[in-house]
């Protein structure tokens, strides 16, 4: 795999987008960050997979974002207005601690999994920040964004150990399924339940 | 014609059509019921991979899809019968319980996907199929017009988190098969596999979502899901242990199973004793059932396997009866909180009797369905860890305590003779459930040996 310094650019993009998803309270900005995140996932995956296969992740991810975006009824915020700043600060502090934890476990993970360091760093960053997101919210959109982030991180790591075309397709289906579930959960209260 | 087409793909196709026709609830219920009964009867009577006597046809056991194999062998027939019996049981009662219209089509689709997960090779695709079943179940748990509670969200999160663990574990297990001396990879695979199954089965301490989900979603849908999913995942786990023999040769695995199972029974029992919601109680009862299944597997002998498969029957009837009765009560009172259920026995005597007996059976009360197997199981566990059995009994007592509190709420000590408000169909189904639980408890040899045939479909570990 190409170990040039350029490969660390998508790693940084992944960490920043995941961090933004964690502290952001505007759903439009969140969906855009998710789209950029999938671009970085695609970039990182091309280091291990052929371009044609890696693009599946990009397309599926963008479709997932589009599904979630289309299901938003117009409510702009992901957070209560009063708790935004304090909540963002708290999340940022937690993210820093989680980031330090990730840095400390990378060498151990590297010795157990045959995954190149940049992929491992990008993958673990997404998994840890995604888990943090999942642990700090009860909102359906945030939960689905967190799950998609965790799955993206896992898929980066998994791409280095498994390159099955069918598996790539099925994981894309799972991502789309998560987005559909998120969209359904957002829309369900307003859906008509006629007999 | 191949078995996977008959018992997996074709019913999935029918489920899709039924989903499109979901507003015709009577038609959907009847088609779903007839299909499930028909497929169960077919599985019970027609051999797979052999010529059918008198017809001359042969049902092929395998189907190759995109290079991967779905394999349904002759020995899997009892499993097919059992799964379609679950489908018939729940779809048959869906109208009586006035459950959401998605229960029949989505339930059928989930059953076929779980069967696909049990028959797919290699094993890693099972993880993706189980995840598909989980995602598909969400509309059933959150019907149109209602908001998603925290329980549903946590359910999706915990079940989805299992997927990465299972996929990496499957990769690791394949690596260990290729190079058995790689002990690091073997250890990593075991840990990841254990985590994956712990998330799937809501094993201690990952079970917090279950009572939440059961307290917020429709009891009928939750009951179905909590019967079908853990059953499929437990059998999938045994298939994995059978496929990778070195996993089950480690005695440490059985110690972990015993500890996890015991902890689940004890902690869930203690929590159940203080609940004030019938839905949440269902969640704790399911946790305790899974705990007992793990305890049965931890015996590491053929008797444990027999108890493990036989326990599916009282669980099926108990959860089914509970879901039906709770569904009827929820429709009538609007809530399953104890406050709303005070003296409900006056209006719904059959549902009250059904709920009480289902609960007491799941708690292990003598003369009811679960008791004979629990007694043997606890005797066997006591041989190796007598102190542990006392804790487990304590957990069961907690559930029993919750049952008596519930009875006190439902009847408030007295209920006078009034006209029952259940429909005749509800009364018949509730009575059938109650009688079956009593039959199992009083004459355990009448029904349980049938369940032992399920062992044919499970790899012999001991």
Image (cartoon, grey):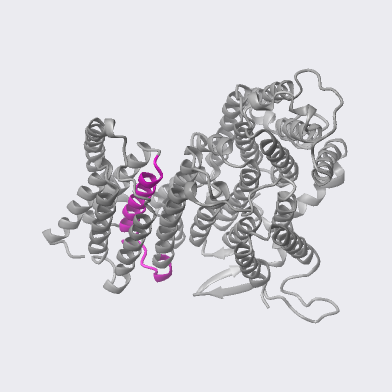
Foreground of the two, B372 or B364: B364
Residue B1 horizontal side relative to residue B172, left or right: right
- Magenta stretch, main secondary structure, is helix
Q: Is A146 colored magenta in this rendering?
A: yes
Relative height, residue B49 to residue B347 (above, below)? below
Quarter the N terminus of chain A occupies: bottom left
Q: Is B232 colored magenta in this rendering?
A: no
Provide residue B364's location: percent of width, then percent of height: 74, 31
Foreground of the two, B380 or B25: B25
Provide residue B360's location: percent of width, then percent of height: 74, 30
Residue at (76% x, 50% y) in the render: B452
Residue A187 horizontal side relative to residue A70, left or right: right
Residue at (86% x, 43% y) in the render: B445
Residue at (78% x, 69% y) in the render: B46
Residue B313 horizontal side relative to residue B117, left or right: right
Which region shows up in magenta?
Answer: A139-167
Relative height, residue A178 to residue B200 (above, below)? below
Q: Residue furthest bottom?
A: B56
Q: Find residue B299 and report its image quarter.
A: top right
Provide residue B216's location: percent of width, then percent of height: 55, 37
Q: Is residue B395 visible?
A: no
Q: Find residue B403 and report its image quarter.
A: top right
Foreground of the two, A165 or A40: A40
Residue at (62% x, 61% y) in the render: B112
């Amino acid at each position: 795999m190409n170990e040039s310094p350029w490969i660390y650019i998508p790693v940084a993009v992944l960490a920043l987008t995941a961090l933004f998803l964690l502290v952001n309270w505007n759903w439009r900005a969140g969906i855009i960050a998710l789209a950029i995140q999938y671009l970085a996932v695609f970039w990182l995956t091309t280091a291990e997979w052929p371009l044609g296969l890696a693009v599946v992740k990009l397309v599926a991810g963008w479709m997932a974002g589009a599904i979630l975006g289309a299901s938003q009824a117009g409510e702009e915020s992901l957070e209560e207005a009063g708790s935004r700043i304090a909540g963002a600060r708290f999340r940022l502090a937690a993210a820093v601690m989680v980031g330090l934890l990730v840095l400390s476990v990378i060498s151990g993970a590297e010795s157990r999994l045959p995954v190149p360091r940049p992929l491992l760093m990008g993958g673990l960053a997404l998994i840890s920040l995604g888990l943090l997101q999942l642990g700090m919210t009860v909102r359906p959109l945030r939960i689905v964004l967190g799950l998609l982030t965790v799955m993206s991180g896992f898929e980066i790591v998994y791409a280095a150990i498994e390159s099955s075309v069918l598996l790539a397709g099925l994981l894309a289906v799972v991502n789309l399924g998560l987005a559909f579930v998120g969209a359904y959960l957002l829309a369900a209260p307003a859906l008509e339940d006629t007999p | 014609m191949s078995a996977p087409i008959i018992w997996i793909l074709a019913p999935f196709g029918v489920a899709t059509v039924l989903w499109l026709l979901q507003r015709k609830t009577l038609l959907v219920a009847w088609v779903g019921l007839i299909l499930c009964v028909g497929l169960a009867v077919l599985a019970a009577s027609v051999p797979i991979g052999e010529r059918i006597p008198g017809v001359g046809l042969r049902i092929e056991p395998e189907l190759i899809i995109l290079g991967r194999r779905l394999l349904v062998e002759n020995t899997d027939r009892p499993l097919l019968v059992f799964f379609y019996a679950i489908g018939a049981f729940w779809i048959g009662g869906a109208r009586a319980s006035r459950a959401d219209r998605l229960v029949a089509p989505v339930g059928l689709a989930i059953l076929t996907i779980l069967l696909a997960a049990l028959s797919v090779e290699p094993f890693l695709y099972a993880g993706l199929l189980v995840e598909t079943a989980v995602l598909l179940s969400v509309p059933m748990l959150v019907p149109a017009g209602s908001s998603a509670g925290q329980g549903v969200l946590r359910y999706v999160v915990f079940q989805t988190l299992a997927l990465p663990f299972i996929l990496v574990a499957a990769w690791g297990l394949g690596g260990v098969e290729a190079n058995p001396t790689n002990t690091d990879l073997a250890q990593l695979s075991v840990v990841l596999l254990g985590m994956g199954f712990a998330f799937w089965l809501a094993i201690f301490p990952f079970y917090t979502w279950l009572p939440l989900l059961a307290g917020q979603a429709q009891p009928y849908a939750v009951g179905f899901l909590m019967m079908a999913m853990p059953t499929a995942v437990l059998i999938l786990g045994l298939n994995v242990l059978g496929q990778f023999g070195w996993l089950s040769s480690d005695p440490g695995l059985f110690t972990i199973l015993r500890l996890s199972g015991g902890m689940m029974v004890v902690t869930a029992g203690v929590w159940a004793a203080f609940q004030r919601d019938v839905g949440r109680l269902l969640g704790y009862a399911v946790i305790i059932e899974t705990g007992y299944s793990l305890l049965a597997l931890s015996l590491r002998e053929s008797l444990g396997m027999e108890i493990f498969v036989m326990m599916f029957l009282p669980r099926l009837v108990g959860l089914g009866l509970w879901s039906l009765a709770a569904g009827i009560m929820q429709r009538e009172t609007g809530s399953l909180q104890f406050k709303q259920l005070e003296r409900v026995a006056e209006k719904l005597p059959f549902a009250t009797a059904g709920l009480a007996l289902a609960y007491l059976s799941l708690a292990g009360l003598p003369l009811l369905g679960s008791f004979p197997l629990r007694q043997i199981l606890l005797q066997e566990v006591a041989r190796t860890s007598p102190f542990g059995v006392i804790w487990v009994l304590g957990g069961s007592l907690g559930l029993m305590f919750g049952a008596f509190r519930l009875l006190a709420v439902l009847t408030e000590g007295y209920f006078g003779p009034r006209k029952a408000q259940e429909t005749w169909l509800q009364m018949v189904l509730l009575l059938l459930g109650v009688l079956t639980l009593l039959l199992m408890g009083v004459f355990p040899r009448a029904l349980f040996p049938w369940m032992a045939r399920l062992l044919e479909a499970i790899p012999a570990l001991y």
